[in-house]
């Protein structure tokens, strides 16, 4: 079932992440420590990579390695774009290299997890999802 809805779920997640990245949320989150912000960035991009990997692998039928590569590159490009837009078009948000670095860390952890899954799960039953 997740295979069937992976594309709309990924689009919705990306749009939601974009909105949350570009709107003023200081009244919602007050004085959040910088460390928590970076963990949030890493977690957001971890989920981003996993969702888009599922789309590329199952919906677009990319080979496993190609789906990993596209998901990683898409995450990196998206993260850089959003940080650039925060500094360029918003008044309440600012670009931060450390946010891009946190995004990359989340991306790398997702890619490592997906590589680990391939080595363990896919060899035994050739499917990642139910």
Image: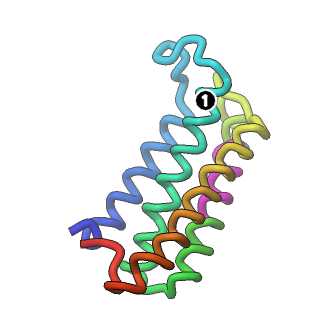
Q: Residue at x 58, y 65 (%)?
A: 111
Q: Is residue 96 magenta?
A: no
Q: Which residue is mark 1?
A: 37
User: Relative to residue 113, is residue 63 depicted above or below?
Assistant: below
Q: Is residue 31 left or right of residue 47?
A: right
User: Relative to residue 15, is residue 51 depicted above or below?
Assistant: below
Q: Secondary structure at mark 1?
A: helix
User: Relative to residue 130, is residue 29 depicted above or below?
Assistant: above
Q: Residue at x 55, y 36 (%)?
A: 40
Q: Is residue 81 magenta?
A: yes
Which scheme is used to colour this image of the protein?
rainbow
Q: Which quadrant of the view contains residue 130? A: bottom left
Which quadrant of the rendered structure holds the N terminus? bottom left
Tell me residue 10's x, y (percent).
40, 59
Q: Residue at x 68, y 43 (%)?
A: 102
Q: Which residues are magenta?
A: 74-83
Tell me residue 65's x, y (percent).
58, 82
- Label 1 crowd (10 A; few <14 / some 14-19 / many >=20): few
Q: Is residue 85 left or right of residue 20?
A: right
Nearest to the observer: residue 120 or residue 14: 120
Q: Residue at x 56, y 68 (%)?
A: 71
Tell me residue 62's x, y (percent).
48, 85
Tell me residue 64's x, y (percent).
51, 82
**Magenta portion: prevailing SS class:** helix
Furthest residue toward left:
1
Nearest to the observer: residue 88 or residue 106: 106
User: Relative to residue 26, is residue 115 depicted above or below?
Assistant: below
Count numbered badges in the picture: 1
């Amino acid at each position: 079932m997740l295979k069937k809805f992976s594309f709309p779920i990924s689009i919705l997640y990306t749009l939601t992440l974009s909105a949350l990245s570009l709107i003023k949320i200081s009244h919602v989150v007050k004085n959040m420590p910088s460390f928590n912000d970076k963990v949030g960035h890493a977690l957001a991009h971890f989920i981003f990579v996993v969702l888009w990997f599922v789309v590329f692998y199952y919906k677009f039928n990319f080979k496993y390695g190609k789906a990993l590569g596209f998901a990683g590159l898409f995450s990196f490009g998206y993260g850089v774009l959003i940080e650039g837009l925060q500094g360029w078009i918003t008044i309440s948000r600012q670009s931060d290299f450390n946010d891009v670095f946190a995004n990359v860390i989340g991306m790398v952890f997702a890619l490592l997890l997906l590589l680990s899954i391939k080595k363990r799960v896919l060899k035994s039953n050739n499917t990642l999802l139910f």
